[in-house]
Image (cartoon, helix red, strand yellow):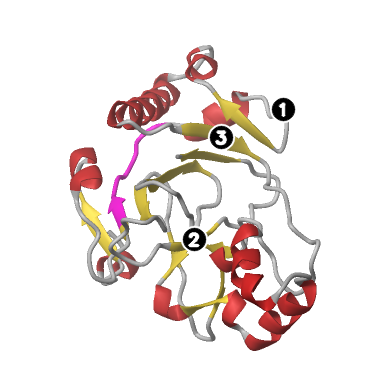
Amino acid sequence: MSNALSGNKQIGRVSSFKDLVTTDFKGVMNALCWHRNLEGDFAAIVSQLQLKDNITEILPEDLLALQLSERGNRAREIILNDLQLLANFGASPSLNLLKCYERDDELDFISTDVYSYHVDRSPIATDTFLCTYYGAASDIIPNHEAEQKTLIPEIRKKLKTLHQGPPEEFEDFLKENYFDLHYQAKPNAQPINLGIGHLWRLAVDHPKQQVLPCIHRAPKENEGEYRLLLIC
């Protein structure tokens, strides 16, 4: 594992899927990485898949229909195995071929799309799993290196102007519009790139969560290159 990951207290390191799903988050650790050096031609898979929209879900039968070399077949086996492991665990994984996500440019002072640093929230105990097999990979950032956007005075002032209801309903307004999920990196913050092929488990904001949720963002895509991403 790279020095950037191995020396970071936010990230727990495991060597198997079993450890990935059974290790508890604790303290400042709110991200777990099953670090892998995958062998296989994932580019061959991406080159044969058909993008129908900016984001296209790829089903197992889509993968099985591809004519691949030995290395391409190895990549396919890895993806199918990851999907099966997560499904057996009780998760609902989705494999996406991705050109870009939808941008949120409605407000010029705050963004609520996935390119903005954000946390995931759920009403039930769950985690976010993701793995980038090809293309640009996501970033996470230590919680102490980011500030909730709704607490930044100039942004909060504008949000209060946007809010039309009574002051006591302002916090509910922030939650209902997902403004409170988004963060801004502090000066000199050092984001951590999740890299290619590693399977990650990130802490989510839910009622039973014992740690801070993991702040993450989608990457800016590389020019002319799709992403192949497993997420659930």
Report the amino acid beneath label 3: Asn
Q: On the image, numbered disc 1 is attached to which residue?
A: 52
The mark that comes first in sequence, 3 or 1, is: 1
Find out whether the residues at labels 2 and 1 contact each other: C-beta distance under 8 Å.
Answer: no
In the picture, the disc for residue 96 is: 3
In percent of width and height, residue 86 lies at: 34, 32
Residue at disc 1, secondary structure: loop
Asked if residue 36 lies in the magenta stretch, the reply is yes
- Up-down relation of residue 26 to residue 56 (above or below): below
Residue 9: where, in percent of width, then height? 26, 71
Going from N to C along the chain, the mark reached first, 2 or 1, is 1
- Splitting the image into 4 quarters, where does residue 53 fall? top right
> Closer to the camera, 194 or 206?
206
Q: Nearer the viewer, residue 54 or 29?
A: 29
Disc 1 marks which amino acid? Lys
Tell me how far mark 2 sits from mark 1, CA to CA.
Answer: 28 Å
Vertical position of residue 179 compared to residue 223: above or below: below
Q: Position of residue 21 (x, y in %)?
A: 24, 43
Q: Earlier in the sequence, mark 2 or mark 3?
A: 3
Q: Position of residue 106 (x, y in %)?
A: 81, 61
Q: In the image, which residues are magenta?
A: 32-40
